[in-house]
Image (cartoon, rainbow, N blue to C red):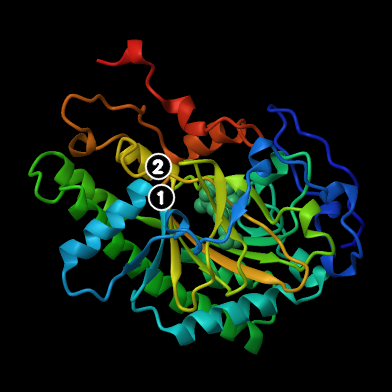
């Protein structure tokens, strides 16, 4: 694969799905300045001020500690944070710190491979969205982000990474072992957190049809893993690591290296970006759009983005949890407050993703596309 310098990309039309090209295999380390292709001119939310996330009480990202013996209190704290922030830091979750460090180290090794090795595993049209390179949805933006990415289904780690390491040698074995262990731990944690959310929503006690739905959601939860590498940037003010977005699934665990970069958009009392501190051993939980739908907006998905810095590379590992592709997601009856209506139409995850693509790079929330208009409410 020939490594070329990126040229300016143009916005693809909604009818022709964007595809990666050689220009997307970009050698960030060779760059002494941010080229035009990566010069970020984001929408208006990029003008909001950035705050540190610890100076004023209103900017302190909530921390939920799972070590508390009182399960109801933990569930209530997680639900409060999901309602008020749409995100929180999770500590005391039981995933060993040693494993988190090993996973980060393995991700760093993967990204340090020559571009030609990584490009063997490039995302392919029709490849189900997995592979190395820019996630398909982000190709909708007119500019590229200052990041390398790799997406893979948690259920297919070994087959996916044979593409990078066809000889299945030691590097492959240690990489897959770390990712497998991470998946096993996070899947269990995901189920636990989901059960806690349901408990806080009063679902387990509801005794109605939702009990069945709740069980189905727990039993069929799917996991997609993604690795982000944000190389240090010669001019961080002129580039973005990951454009502002909401996650589309139920919720995401993000393991981030201690280098801060993740920011959450807070709207009240005034619009600002709050930087999530890099807390060793903590996982960030981010509520996604489909959980927003499931809870009829009680838990809200949060706009977030990743910024880059001049001094250090940053790695993050989001673990996306959501429904299986065929499952229709609609507000749970028990989550619709008395006297209120279901505010969203039922939708599958792939249907929602397709609709959402049209909103990337605009200030429109894709949730508005599935919102039931007042005159349609029954
Ligand atoms: C499960 C998924 C979530 C994701 C789309 C995907 O199918 C795999 C890539 C994920 C990612 C990572 C970068 C940001 C994001 C918005 C994107 O374009 O691709 C998320 C997607 C998401 O949460 O919708
Ligand atoms: O890098 C981060 O901390 C955020 C990553 C993220 O939001 C994503 O991949 O969806
Ligand atoms: Fe995200």
The residue shown at (71%, 57%) is: 133
Up the image or down, 350 lies above or below 85; here it is above
Residue 180 position in % (x across, y down): 47, 76
For label 1, the crowd category at 10 Å Cα-Cα, with few meaning under 14, some 14 to 19 and many 20 or more, is many
Q: Which residue is mark 2?
A: 290
Up the image or down, 294 lies above or below 156; here it is above
Query: Is residue 103 visible to the viewer in this orientation of the structure?
Result: yes
Dot 1 falls on a residue whose secondary structure is loop
Query: If the image is split into quadrants, where does the C terminus sit?
Result: top left
- Toward which corner of the image does residue 344 lie, by quadrant? top left
Up the image or down, 195 lies above or below 246; here it is below
Q: Which residue is mark 1?
A: 85
Q: Return the residue found at the far front.
A: 56
The answer to whether 137 appears left or right of 351 in the picture is right
For label 2, the crowd category at 10 Å Cα-Cα, with few meaning under 14, some 14 to 19 and many 20 or more, is many
Residue 239 position in % (x across, y down): 77, 53
The answer to whether 226 appears left or right of 85 in the picture is right
Q: Is mark 2 within 8 Å of ligand 1?
A: no
Toward the viewer: 218 or 27? Answer: 27
């Amino acid at each position: 694969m020939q490594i070329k310098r990126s040229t300016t990309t143009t916005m693809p039309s909604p009818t022709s799905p964007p595809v990666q090209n050689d220009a997307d295999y970009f050698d960030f380390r060779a760059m002494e300045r941010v080229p035009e292709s990566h010069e970020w001119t984001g929408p208006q939310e990029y003008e909001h001020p950035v705050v540190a996330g610890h100076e004023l009480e209103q900017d302190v990202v909530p921390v939920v500690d799972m070590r508390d013996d009182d399960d109801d209190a933990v569930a209530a704290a997680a639900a409060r944070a999901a309602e008020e922030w749409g995100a929180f830091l999770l500590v005391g979750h039981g995933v060993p710190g040693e494993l988190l460090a090993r996973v980060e180290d393995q991700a760093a090794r993967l990204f340090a491979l020559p571009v030609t090795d990584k490009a063997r595993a490039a995302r392919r049209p029709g490849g189900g969205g997995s592979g190395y390179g820019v996630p398909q949805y982000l190709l909708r933006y007119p500019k590229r982000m200052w990041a390398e990415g790799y997406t893979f289904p948690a259920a297919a780690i070994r087959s996916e990474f044979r593409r990078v390491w066809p000889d299945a040698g030691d590097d492959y074995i240690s990489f897959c072992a770390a990712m497998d262990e991470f998946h096993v731990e996070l899947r269990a944690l995901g189920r636990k957190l989901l059960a806690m959310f349901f408990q806080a929503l009063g679902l387990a006690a509801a005794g109605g049809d939702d009990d069945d739905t709740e069980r189905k959601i727990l039993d069929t939860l799917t996991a997609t893993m993604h690795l982000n590498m944000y190389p240090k940037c010669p001019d961080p003010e002129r580039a973005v690591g990951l454009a502002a977005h909401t996650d589309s699934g139920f919720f995401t665990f993000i393991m981030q290296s201690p280098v801060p970069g993740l920011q959450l958009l807070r709207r009240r009392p005034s619009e600002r970006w709050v930087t999530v501190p890099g807390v060793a051993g903590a996982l960030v939980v981010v509520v996604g759009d489909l959980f927003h739908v499931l809870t009829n907006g009680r838990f809200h998905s949060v706009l977030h983005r990743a910024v880059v810095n001049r001094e250090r590379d940053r790695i993050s590992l989001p673990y996306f949890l959501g429904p299986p592709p065929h499952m229709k997601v609609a507000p749970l009856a028990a989550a619709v407050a008395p006297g209120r209506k279901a505010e969203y139409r039922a939708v599958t995850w792939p249907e929602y993703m397709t609709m959402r693509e049209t909103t990337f790079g605009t200030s429109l929330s894709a949730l508005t596309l599935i919102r039931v208009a007042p005159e349609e409410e029954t």
